[in-house]
Image (cartoon, helix red, strand yellow):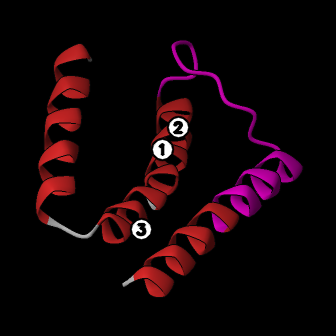
């Protein structure tokens, strides 16, 4: 996982140099969506390895928090672009 983290950091720095910062922030704001989706998939397919709270209220809270982050990223990208 360190190799992936390093590759992501390098690509992020490259993107910051060549793209407006607001667009990069808007792209990064969508990352929690993929993290939640992969957490759900992995906890359903490998429950002995990954554990994630999956009741309705927990999913609702996580979805609302992700929505706030995505909306904030979109606002930043539209106001500074």
On screen, 10 above or below 77? above
Q: Which residue is mark 2?
A: 39
Instruction: Indicate left or right for 31 with 72 as reference.
Output: left
Q: Are marks 3 and 2 in contact (CB under 8 Å)?
A: no
On screen, 5 above or below 27? above
| Of marks 2 and 1, the one in the foreground | 1
Magenta residue check for 39: no
Comparing 53 with 14, the one in front is: 14
On screen, 20 above or below 34? below
What secondary structure is marked by label 3? helix
How far across and down, in percent of the image, does residue 25 sit?
Answer: 40, 61
Stretch of the chain drawn in magenta: 46-67
Calculate the distance from the C-alpha at mark 2 to the C-alpha at mark 1. 6 Å
Q: Which residue is mark 1?
A: 35
Q: Which residue is mark 3?
A: 26
Q: Are marks 2 and 1 in contact (CB under 8 Å)?
A: yes
What secondary structure is marked by label 1? helix
Q: Residues within 10 Å of mark 2 (few under 14, many from 20)?
A: some
């Amino acid at each position: 996982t360190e190799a992936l983290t390093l590759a992501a950091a390098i690509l992020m720095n490259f993107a910051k140099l060549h793209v407006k910062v607001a667009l990069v922030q808007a792209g990064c704001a969508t990352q929690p969506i993929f993290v939640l989706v992969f957490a759900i998939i992995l906890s359903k397919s490998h429950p002995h390895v990954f554990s994630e709270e999956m009741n309705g209220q927990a999913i609702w809270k996580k979805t609302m928090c992700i929505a706030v982050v995505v909306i904030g990223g979109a606002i930043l990208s539209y106001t500074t672009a």
